[in-house]
Image: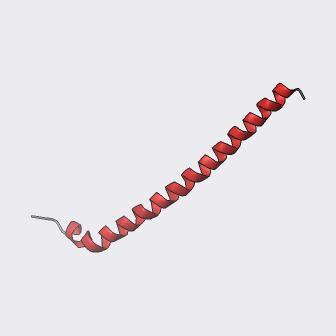
Amino acid sequence: MSQTLKAKASKADQATFFLARANESLLRDSEFVDSIAKGLLEYFALNFGERFRRPHY
């Protein structure tokens, strides 16, 4: 394999590795945000649920 092809393959491997790491990081971040959102929804449902269930006339 020529040096140019080796260099291109190496750069492609590096880019693939970088994208895989970025994807893992985004997945972890989205799971964290989901857990915060679920916690907030549970908090508001427990503390303010009655207020929003009854119609205000």
User: Is 6 displayed left or right of 54 in the figure?
Assistant: right
Work out whether residue 28 or residue 40 is closer to the camera in this orientation and state it. 28
The N terminus: image quadrant: top right
Tell me which residue sits at (36%, 65%) in the image.
Answer: 40
User: Is 27 displayed left or right of 53 in the figure?
Assistant: right
Tell me which residue sits at (57%, 52%) in the image.
Answer: 25
- Residue 12, given in percent of the width and then of the height, sits at 73, 35
The C terminus: image quadrant: bottom left
- Residue 56, given in percent of the width and then of the height, sits at 13, 65
User: Is 46 displayed left or right of 14 in the figure?
Assistant: left
Tell me which residue sits at (60%, 47%) in the image.
Answer: 22
Most distant residue in the left direction: 57
Work out whether residue 35 or residue 5 is closer to the camera in this orientation and state it. 5
Work out whether residue 23 or residue 7 is closer to the camera in this orientation and state it. 7
- Residue 14 position (above or below residue 50): above
Tell me which residue sits at (71%, 40%) in the image.
Answer: 14
Most distant residue in the right direction: 1
- Residue 3, given in percent of the width and then of the height, sits at 85, 27
- Residue 38, given in percent of the width and then of the height, sits at 41, 65
